[in-house]
Amino acid sequence: MSPRVKNAAATREAILASARSRFIEESYDNVGLREIAGDAGVDVALIGRYFGSKEELFKEVLRAGKKPDWLDPSVGHRELPAYLASLAVEEDCADRKKHAEGLLIMLRSASSPKAGEVIRQALREDVLEPIAKLLPGADAEVRSSLALSIFFGTNVMRTIMAVEPLCQCDSGSVRGHMQRLLEAALTGDRTA
């Protein structure tokens, strides 16, 4: 165990960073609080003090990994496909790496009953509902879910699995193809 950090905010951040690293590498069910505490150089009781439980710590890891302002409020339903396509092929390497790590955390832990529910709730509240609110029509939630499937699938194939030619393809080309797919999903247009 490394020397304990004395500052409460620094201790909390050290626990979060250790938990994030562990959840990137292993599933929720395979990560122990003692391992996280050891990596952070703190006593395991401090995790309970700062986060309450492993589940709450996992929620915080998911929350810390997302951009709070990811959906620009000026984007309307007509601009949404282009906007989402641009987000999917971000050029900033740091953002792309952080996004890939967030996907890994979700993918590794999605089959866990506890973590899976946390992930589904976060996706519903932070992504699906905000997109659905922008869409006209009765089946907006279904179309929002389809768009998210396209978005996540493309990102998994490009960043995590590095499937060629998708990961080597020009970002502009990928963005254009993705925009058309997202337009079809978000509008419900079956001819696109």
Image (cartoon, helix red, strand yellow):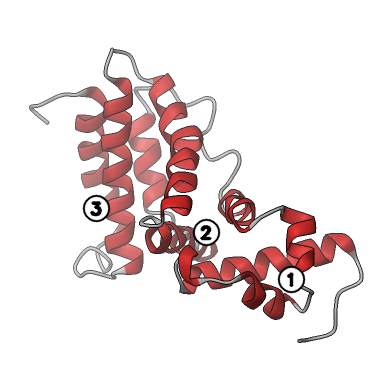
Rendered residue at 40%/37% (across/down): 83
Report x, y in % for residue 10: 83, 65
Circle 2 residues within 10 Å: few <14, some 14–19, many ≥20: few
Using the numbered discs, state the Cα–Cα distance from disc 1 to disc 3 in whole angstroms.
48 Å
Give the foreground label among 2 and 3: 2
Q: Quadrant of the C terminus?
A: top left
Rendered residue at 42%/42% (across/down): 120
From this viewpoint, which residue is outermost toward the top? Answer: 137
Using the numbered discs, state the Cα–Cα distance from disc 1 to disc 2 in whole angstroms.
31 Å
Residue 111 image label: none
Task: Tell me the element at label 2.
Answer: helix
Report x, y in % for residue 130: 47, 28
Q: Label 3 is placed on what type of residue?
A: Ser
From this viewpoint, which residue is outermost toward the left? Answer: 191
Q: Is residue 162 left or right of residue 57?
A: left
Disc 3 designates what residue? 173
Disc 2 designates what residue? 95
* Picture quadrant of residue 182: top left
Disc 1 designates what residue? 44
Q: Is residue 116 left or right of residue 42?
A: left
Q: Is residue 185 above or below residue 28?
A: above
Q: Label 2 is placed on what type of residue?
A: Asp
